[in-house]
Image: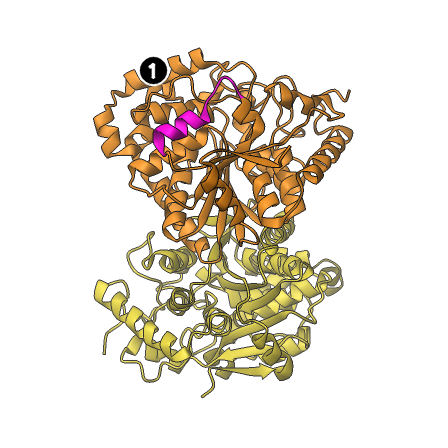
Chain colours: A orange, B yellow
Amino acid sequence: MEEFTVVYNRDKGESFVKSLKDCRTMNLYFIGSTETSTIPGISVAGASPKLTLYTPACDVEYLVHGKPLSFDVIPVTPEGIPTPALITRVALMLSKLPYLIVDTGSYIEPKIPRVSLPSKCTGKRIDHGEALPYDKVKELYCQSATLAKLLSSSCDLFVIGESIPGGTTTALGILVGLGYNAWGMVSSAGPNNPHKLKKSVVKRGLTNSKLSIEETRKDPFKAVSALGDPVHVSIAGFLSQALSEGVKVILAGGTQMAAVLAIAKHLGTDLSRDITIATTRWLINDQSSSIIDLVKMISPHVPIIAVNLDFSSSPFEGLRYYEKGYVKEGVGAGGTTLASLAVKNTSLQRIVYEIYREYHRLVKSGEASGVTHS
Amino acid sequence: MEEFTVVYNRDKGESFVKSLKDCRTMNLYFIGSTETSTIPGISVAGASPKLTLYTPACDVEYLVHGKPLSFDVIPVTPEGIPTPALITRVALMLSKLPYLIVDTGSYIEPKIPRVSLPSKCTGKRIDHGEALPYDKVKELYCQSATLAKLLSSSCDLFVIGESIPGGTTTALGILVGLGYNAWGMVSSAGPNNPHKLKKSVVKRGLTNSKLSIEETRKDPFKAVSALGDPVHVSIAGFLSQALSEGVKVILAGGTQMAAVLAIAKHLGTDLSRDITIATTRWLINDQSSSIIDLVKMISPHVPIIAVNLDFSSSPFEGLRYYEKGYVKEGVGAGGTTLASLAVKNTSLQRIVYEIYREYHRLVKSGEASGVTHS
């Protein structure tokens, strides 16, 4: 199997990847929380609904230090499947690509040096239709754009990942709030995508917010303020500024990145070039979501690339679960792997081998103790 | 006049500068506060002793946005002489070098995206001999080292500046605490260096802290904890990690950088190569301080470079004051100018011309209203 497959806008995607060799690259992982993730059944990006609030901080602490600092164990699903930050960490270590964490509103502050946006704030439950104060939304967008400006002159490529449990539900909220018929199209970190629950949460939010599409199409910040979260709008601000500075961007994530594209588009960003979505094969193969249809609907010129990560021959049960539809993507796993392959010429085989070794280390040290070592 | 002069370790300094051309560069400005700056007479880096606490945040807000956000006017001395961030901003704009702000403990949070160290904290008055909790000192060092690690693989050169009013007094505290006879050698942002006052503050701190040199030479964090501040130890951590990753470093500052060198040295950092101090001609010409003697005493292999900024033909009185010994250095003014010349091949003449234009803009917009336009 090829290391990656361009699954949408093939020619453009392939030439994009070719252009990445030896690019001066900066990876950024935007973290934030939304209390939407504590609605039972919405998110499995944590061992319990409450614990999902701690996942973003633990994800990035693990990324930087190889273990979380705020908790004893790495984030897992209720079944004990480990965070995709595992993949990201290995891809970063092998490629030696530099990176920064950007805190847009993590429920707890990660105990690592990270870029802090002054207006960072945790999002409220979107079913109430008042997720974030309007001013904060706008400020997050502008502050992220400022950050992109500070960094752009030294970079040819930004790789942007996210960690926000509940993020596919807020992405759905943003998309629907902006008038897209995205019902049933966003992904999930579990094998059973709770579309019905997500729909009812977003519908309640829509009703409570009294949003009109006419209004949000004129001012997308209103959709985010009612039904969004701090992460997507921050990434949109960073993206828009980066593209206008002539820096290429890999949006390293799944269906959530469609919400980023939608915000940026309705704020007037030209999405016709220098941008691609890169994710994992698991996300693309997911029958319960459709990133391609989302992108077709929002910004049909953006290529989508699947990195062909495959854990079916893993000696560890916890990783083999990825083949059954668990986790799939997050913390920029797919896109960081692509950058590692395309910018630094690492090999996917080597990355997968090192992921097994890293997982073994975690099991041995007890930091992935939720999972049996089969 | 040459654009810059290597005033100490000439051959080494000259080849260092030559090696900088087209280096992948990241500038970092470490900000923090010490309540030492509120002791009347200690610091003129603010219109009043109390206002010195706000200077670091305003300096970097101005750097990023061209105007402070937390206050209406840019930081000035009691006489209305503008912050050296003016020089830094122009050098950054002309060179388009990327940069980040690192908050180690600013009294107020700057309203810009910036790297936040988890253990950031404002320093107490050092005359009490308990400036910072020991654990915080150690954590700041380690967290800054982590930051250097995240960024090092994409950089050939770091330029590190500081903004901390009262910083020469805390630098004196750190140096004396580490056993250096540095009395009367640190600089000041005013023409009348209050050596007597600084000495009495540090002496009281020494007495109150009951420090022994034997102890601090074994564990330099103790000297910082008793008599230091959050900025110098953070820069030392960043510096040590950067050098060990093979990245060159310009310490962009005056006599305070001697305290950075001292901390790093006594923690075992090899300071024999890849590092230089770059500052302004005003600092080197200052009769009331002696950076060369400090460096000779601490790390005799480190070159010192003076950038020959000269405002004597400025149409603005506020800038001509720099020629009379006001301000001299700060916010990485000298070193950022050197990087702009050496990495990006800008010209000093152009930089000075643009500083005049920038100052004119500030006077017109009222953001440097403390100073008359002569």
Quarter of the view holding residue A202 = top left
Quarter of the view holding residue B222 = bottom right
Q: Is residue A343 left or right of residue B265?
A: left
Q: Residue furthest bottom?
A: B1
Q: Amino acid at mark 1?
A: Lys
Q: Position of residue B182 (x, y in %)?
A: 62, 74
Quarter of the view holding residue A117 = top left
Observer able to see residue B183: no
Query: Residue A198, relative to residue B119: is it above or below?
Result: above
Count the marks: 1
Q: Secondary structure at mark 1?
A: helix
**Picture residue at 44% right of the left edge, 33% below the top:** A257
Q: Is residue B306 left or right of residue B209?
A: left
Query: Residue A78, relative to residue B138: is it above or below?
Result: above
Q: Is residue A171 left or right of residue B260?
A: left
Of the pair B120 and A143, the residue shown nearer to us: A143
Q: Which residue carries the number 1 mark?
A: A203
Position of the N terminus of chain A, as image quadrant, is top right
Q: Position of residue A132 (x, y in %)?
A: 35, 30
Position of the C terminus of chain A, as image quadrant, is top right
Specify whether residue A288 is painted magenta: yes
Magenta range is A286-299
Q: Please give the chain letter of the residue carrying mark 1.
A: A
Query: Residue A265, relative to residue A289: is it above or below?
Result: below
**Picture residue at 44% right of the left edge, 72% below the top:** B189
Q: Residue furthest front?
A: A11
Q: Position of residue A102 (x, y in %)?
A: 49, 42
